[in-house]
Image: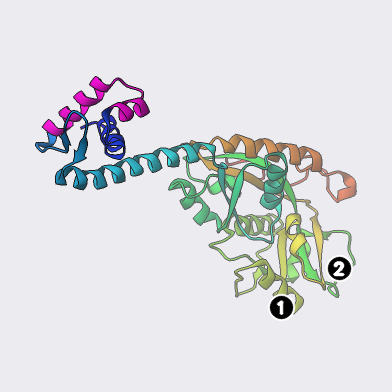
């Protein structure tokens, strides 16, 4: 049974006239008659009562007409769905760690300005969860420190983010232009939730050990940037975070850069090597433009508090590449 036979039959059932039905289908009348006869032979029933001047549906033909119309309707919808998939707005699924970190949100805003036709779905998830979602195709692109990325995840370094400390306005660090890493030895240090930012936590701990001390770590954890700022406001701890965290600061807190050594945290775009999305290259291009405009990958100058031989533990190693 062919779809054209169904279509010819439905047209003939509507016209009840071979000449008019053949004209609607743009075929000769004899070809229409042959296709209807083949359909009846295949079904083993008569669909039409024919005479020289009259055509009627049989009981079998009337029942068959209902189903034939439904089949043709389904085929039409299937075709339209396929066409809609081609013409609909392309979609990008992008991971962000926390709304308090603005690197990926800035990149996505840059992308949207240059490519307004792309529909962006932001998914807030910790680094480990982003890796899982990249692997199973739920995310197209993510952000993090590439040092712990699985082998199948590809990365592109996009930002070297100055590391600093978030403190209350009344804290002894608040009036300084920069805070030495060694000064953190006398503070209780808040780390992020391990499931959210394990790489950042390890980066901070490694930095402290390189300065000759093991930090006193605040025993609690936080699930969000707002909760972290609340703890800082309560003078219960200080929070060692990159400069990109400052956009979500609560009133009453201030961020000061770390110096001696000045240190930067590497943010990389991450994607699965087997992901077929054509938008990954577009995201990388937008990120490069933004990085160049904002100086995300430029060396820290003396005015920014850097010191000769600036230390960036693992900052550009373990798979991170300059953009």
Q: Observer-nearest residue: 318 or 272?
A: 272
Is the residue under label 2 in contact with that under label 1 (CB below 8 Å)? no
Q: Is residue 322 visible?
A: no
- Disc number placed over residue 167 in the picture, else none: none
Residues drawn in magenta: 19-41
Q: Residues within 10 Å of mark 2 (few under 14, many from 20)?
A: some
| Above or below, 268 relative to 123 | above
- Disc number placed over residue 174 in the picture, else none: 2
Q: Observer-nearest residue: 77 or 20?
A: 20
Tag count? 2
What residue sits 75% from the left and 71% below the top?
186
Q: Observer-nearest residue: 271 or 211?
A: 271
Q: Secondary structure at mark 1?
A: loop
- Quadrant the N terminus occupies: top left
- Disc number placed over residue 236 in the picture, else none: 1
Residue at the far front in the pictured view: 53
Q: Position of residue 36 (x, y in %)?
A: 20, 30
Q: Is residue 68 left or right of residue 169?
A: left
Verify whether residue 200 appears in magenta. no
Q: Residues within 10 Å of mark 1 (few under 14, many from 20)?
A: some
Q: Is residue 82 left or right of residue 144?
A: left
- Quadrant the C terminus occupies: top right
What residue sits 73% from the left and 43% below the top?
113
Q: Position of residue 204 (x, y in %)?
A: 66, 58
Residue 226 falls in which quadrant of the image? bottom right
What residue sits 67% from the left and 47% below the top?
108
Q: Is residue 4 visible?
A: yes
């Amino acid at each position: 049974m062919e779809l054209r036979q169904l279509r010819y039959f439905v047209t003939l059932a509507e016209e009840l006239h071979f000449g008019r039905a053949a004209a609607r289908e743009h075929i000769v009348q004899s070809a229409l008659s042959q296709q209807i006869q083949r359909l009846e032979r295949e079904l083993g029933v008569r669909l039409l009562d024919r005479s020289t001047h009259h055509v009627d549906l049989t009981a079998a033909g009337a029942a068959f007409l209902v189903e034939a119309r439904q089949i043709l309707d389904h085929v039409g919808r299937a075709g339209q769905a396929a066409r809609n998939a081609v013409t609909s707005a392309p979609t990008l699924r992008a991971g962000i760690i926390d709304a308090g970190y603005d690197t990926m949100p800035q990149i996505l805003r840059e992308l949207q300005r240059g490519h307004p036709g792309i529909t962006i779905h932001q998914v807030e998830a910790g680094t480990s969860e982003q890796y899982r979602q990249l692997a199973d195709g739920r995310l197209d692109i993510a952000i993090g420190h590439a040092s712990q990325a699985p082998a199948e995840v590809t990365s592109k370094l996009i930002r070297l983010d100055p590391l600093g400390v978030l403190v209350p306005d009344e804290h002894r660090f608040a009036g300084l232009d920069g805070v030495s890493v060694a000064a953190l030895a006398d503070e209780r240090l808040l780390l992020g939730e391990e499931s959210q930012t394990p790489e950042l936590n390890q980066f901070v701990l490694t930095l402290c050990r390189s300065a000759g001390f093991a930090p006193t770590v605040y025993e609690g954890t936080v699930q969000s940037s707002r909760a972290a700022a609340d703890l800082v406001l309560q003078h219960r701890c200080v929070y060692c975070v990159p400069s990109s965290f400052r956009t979500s600061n609560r009133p009453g807190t201030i961020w000061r850069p770390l110096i001696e050594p000045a240190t930067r945290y590497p943010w990389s775009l991450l994607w699965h090597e087997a992901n077929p999305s054509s938008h990954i290259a577009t995201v990388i291009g937008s990120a490069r433009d933004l990085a160049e405009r904002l100086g995300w990958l430029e060396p820290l100058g003396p005015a920014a508090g850097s010191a000769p031989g600036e230390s960036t533990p693992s900052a550009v190693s373990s798979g991170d590449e300059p953009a």
